[in-house]
Amino acid sequence: MSEIVKKPGRGRRIILWRHGQTSWNVERRFQGTTDVELTEAGLGQARRAARLLASLRPDAIVASDLKRAADTAGELAALTALDVTHDEGLRETYAGVWQGLTHDEIIVRHGDEYAAWKRGEPVRRGGGELETEVAERAAPVVLRHAEKLPDEGTLVVVSHGGTIRTTIGRLLGLEAHHWESLGGLSNCCWSVLGEGARGWRLLEHNAGTLPEPVLGDDD
């Protein structure tokens, strides 16, 4: 994983922001790469979060091209006057026949596969992508845009829960079977990675409020 940690010490920051609520989120349906739009509540979540994130003065925004992420990113773009770069590499995990099924339906129809995935085994859920394959396509997108930042610059990445989790795991250099230890993100919440002397650090996870400075011996 050493190729993931590059040029430490510039003080850059990456905010990985999950999209707002969709109807499939409410129904607990696996979305994957299905292009589901935001609900009115999800749009409201995006607007609220955008007001907070705009105060961090981001330098760039990159987003998945799926509508739920693109529309979430658009709310921040409207406040910051930044252009949004859309990249399909930031899409959610493709999960084949799981897509469109509810959580309960997946357990009934694909229970062994689901259990193996939760144990941390490499599983192509529904015949789709491995989590490591998601990280392999998404993490380089994030790094490529982070490399363009000025010192102390901030990049906002608007993506999906599973993609964000695997990307964080890869950027932190965690082994893939440990990625599940990173809890999920609520709709329109975000995680923050900061650049330190030894590479990227997880500063905030599943946050919905602005980051607070760390006051103590581990700042």
Image (cartoon, rainbow, N blue to C red):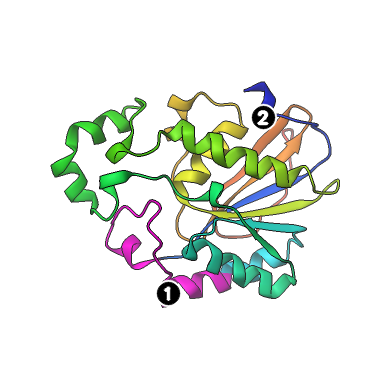
Q: Nearer the viewer, residue 49 or 82?
A: 82
* Residue linked to disc 2: 4
**x, y percent for residue 112:** 19, 31
**Dot 1, crowdedness within 10 Å: few (<14), some or many (≥20)?**
few
Q: Nearer the viewer, residue 52 or 117?
A: 117
Instruction: State the CA–CA distance, disc 2 to disc 1.
Output: 36 Å
Kindly identify the residue that appears in the image at 77 percent across and 42 percent down. 147
Q: Quadrant of the C terminus?
A: top right
Kindly identify the residue that appears in the image at 60 percent across and 65 percent down. 73
Magenta residues, start to end: 22-48
**x, y percent for residue 170:** 57, 32
Q: Earlier in the sequence, mark 2 or mark 1?
A: 2
Residue 95, can we see it? Answer: yes
**x, y percent for residue 149:** 80, 48
Residue 214, can we see it? Answer: no
Q: Quadrant of residue 201?
A: top right
Amino acid type of the residue that numbered disc 1 sits on in the rendered structure: Ala
Q: Which mark is residue 41?
A: 1
Left-right relation of 107 to 136: left
